[in-house]
Amino acid sequence: MQKSDKKPHDDKSKAKESKATPNDKFFAGIQSSVDVFFDPEREVPRFVKTGFQSLDTALGGGIANGLTILGAKPGSGKTSLVHQIAEHISSAEIPVLYFSLEMSREQINAKSMNRNLWRELEKPENQRDQKKFQGVTSRNFIFNNLPNINLSDTEAKEPGKKLIKKAAEEANKRLKHFYVVEPGTLIDGSVFGGRIAEIRAVIEKFIDFCGSKQPLVIIDYLQIVGTDREYATERQSVDAVIHELFPIKTKIPIILISSLNRGSYTAENEAKSVNTIGMGSFKESGNIEFSAEVLIGMQDISENEDTEPRKISLKLLKHRYGRPGSEVLLFYNRKHDLFEETPNRFDGAVGVTEQEIEQDRLWNQFMNATGKMKKKEWVPDWK
């Protein structure tokens, strides 16, 4: 009788191979591979420009997919800053979904109207009209009490009405792709109440609505977003919000505005009594410092309450895809709801050393001196 060459354990091996479990398919499906980077159909993450070149540079090109959290104490202008950024993004034909849980749509639109009016007034041909609108703020648009101008009277031809209309046209252009959801908004027959489950549902609908255009989402602000947790602390509520947004943040960029209390600022330089914002400033707001891709601390570093425009410091406390520690400095005109870039550094800015301040002072002194020198053409002696 001929002996078989087959080994006894071969039958056991085949039997084992034939008994494929659901786990085999599952783990094969989630196996990691860098081949995705060579896929011609892969959607490469993009950067969304903020309208502030210095901020875009600090962010490595702009706002990317994930959570970008901006934290500041109340009254610092964080809503005005984010709204101005959103307005710029909308003007670039990128859809923006803005959850305004604190301000009404009318208040948001008034900020835009006021900002664009003063943009028009800063133009050389309109600067002579600035006195007519001195003292005008977004409040004047809400209550229709502009000096000598009745906005609702379309037939009237008051002085300055033409300039107002021009500002309105510019504001509407910038807001063409800007969508505001506020508590009380009717969505699919239900009244929006500002809960995180509702926010997530609206975001998912908005992504479908935008189609191939990847949108930007803004939530203003984090601490008043509702959750399904009864009797939850603020930390627990914030953590629940972050958890709900995790599946979406990989698809689109999301900006969360976070309110910080005065006690969250620490005195890092007791000799100068300078209160600065840092990672610890967000500790009372849950685990957002761990979940965010970018964490920005916003601080008013003006000399006193009467300083205009305000001096604002934006410090990158965390940047998952870049280098943290960068600082961006802006001027903020509160009456005009307008932020503008400055090429100079402010004395007392967060992260600015005394050596840097002295170097800037000497450089400015040198530039002023050389600028005042009379330039004479050099004539050689031998001519």
Image (spheres, rainbow, N blue to C red):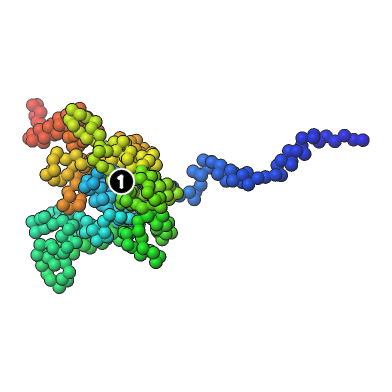
Q: Where residue 14 appears, x then y in whole percent? A: 74, 41
Q: Residue furthest right?
A: 1
Vertical comparison of 30 with 140: above or below: above
Tell me which corner region of the image, top left, top right, bottom left or bottom right, holds residue 214: bottom left
Vertical comparison of 171 with 282: above or below: below
Viewer can see residue 177: no
Tell me the SS state at disc 1: strand
Horizontally, residue 191 falls left or right of residue 146, namely: right
Viewer can see residue 103: yes
Identify the residue under disc 1: 258
Q: Residue at x 16, y 56 (%)?
A: 137
The N terminus sits in image quarter: top right
Tell me which corner region of the image, top left, top right, bottom left or bottom right, holds residue 307: top left
Disc tally is 1
Q: Residue at x 10, y 55 (%)?
A: 134
Horizontally, residue 380 falls left or right of residue 85, namely: left
Vertical comparison of 247 with 166: above or below: above
Q: Residue furthest bottom?
A: 155
Horizontally, residue 323 falls left or right of residue 359, namely: right
Depth order, front residue of 298/176: 298
Q: Where residue 274 appears, x then y in whole percent? A: 20, 33
Q: Where residue 355 appears, x then y in whole percent? A: 20, 27
Q: Residues within 10 Å of mark 1 (few under 14, many from 20)?
A: many
Tell me which corner region of the image, top left, top right, bottom left or bottom right, holds residue 167: bottom left
Q: Residue at x 17, y 58 (%)?
A: 139
Q: Residue at x 11, y 44 (%)?
A: 306
Q: Amino acid at mark 1?
A: Ser
Depth order, front residue of 176/135: 135
